[in-house]
Image (tube, grey):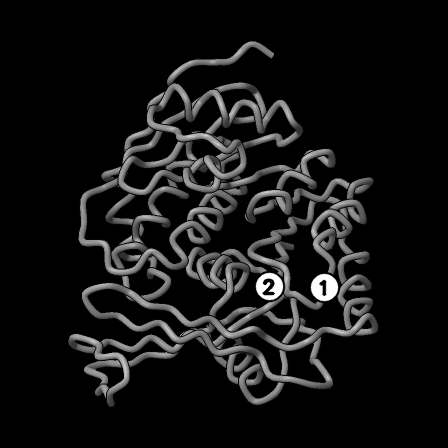
Amino acid sequence: MIYTVTLNPSIDYVVETYKLKIGEVNRANNEELYPGGKGINVSLMLNELKEENTALGFLGGFTGEYIENTLVSRGVNTEFIKLQEGLSRINLKIKDEDETEINGKGPRISEDELRLLYKKIEKLKDEDILVLCGSIPQSLSNTLYEDIVSMVAKKDVKVIVDTTSNLLLNTLKYNPFLIKPNIHELEEIFKTKIGSIDKTIFYATKLKDMGAKNVIISMGKDGALLVDEKGEIYLSNAPKGNVVNTVGSGDSMVAGFISGYLRTKDYKEALKLGASCGSATAFSSGISGKKLIDILKNEIEIKEICKINM
């Protein structure tokens, strides 16, 4: 079974307006609601790819009920911890000439509620997949992802981590199956400017040397780079299209990679499906459907660059 963890889910309230005027009443031209959170995005894309999965995390109040009901209606299994107090957050995303976001803080999570999540994770078995995505709420320790990965380290659970900075680096000693920083996060981790494929390969390889088995660097219009556990390095292109919304694109890439790997056990094919899913979501208003993914997959080319010495 694939399990995704979203610690601070949201309702994403997306509003389109014309020439936003601060301090005045503005009218929406269009508005939509989506269940939000990186792990939830992974679950939704896995569902599009017909990969059964279960969404874990914390939900609170009537907003939490909306998130869960929406996921269930779309065929996603859910085992969220229901919080005794507080509401799952609402993130406001205003689309104008530029995009402005106001993200909610989210509810406080108690130690007892956190232990309920730990109990679910302790039940994971060999061959399960665990996806940890996004930030950690302020009410929880910054070591949470590290603590979770350590809980399953002695089992044959494939752990995938998609988060930033030290939250990611601190999990590497447990040899996660896959990490997926984007190019800007890679620059932040190593405190440097990366302006070439050679530099991207260098720093992606460093992350592999630090413990990650497979490393994907998503690079937007420049495609994606994979350094796999055998030392093979692959580069995918990005298909041409109109970018509508980048939210969820990286999460869709993670889901596509998981699905591609499970089907073929071939990292090259996994990257191809991952790149297709990521691009398809970027060209959609929400998580993309399978039809566009299949179209874009025909436009994805994977080049083998080289193999590093191990």
Q: Nearer the viewer, residue 24 or 224?
A: 24
From the top left corner, tell me how far across and down residue 134 is, in percent. 55, 56
Q: Secondary structure at mark 1?
A: loop
Mark 2 secondary-structure assignment: strand
Q: Amino acid at mark 2?
A: Thr
Q: Name the image quarter holding residue 101.
A: bottom left
Residue farthest to the front?
Answer: 23
Q: Is residue 24 above or below residue 227?
A: below
Q: Is residue 19 left or right of residue 132?
A: left
- Mark sitting earlier along the chain (2/1): 2
Residue for point 60% across, 45% down: 160
In the displayed structure, 160 sits above or below 282; it is above
Q: Amino acid at mark 1?
A: Leu
The dot on residue 6 is 2
Q: Residue at x 70, y 54 (%)?
A: 142
The crowd level at tag 2 (other Cα within 10 Å; few <14, some 14-19, many 20+) is: many
Give the x, y percent position of residue 25: 24, 90
Residue 124 on image: x %, y %: 76, 54
Nearest to the observer: residue 153 or residue 220: 220
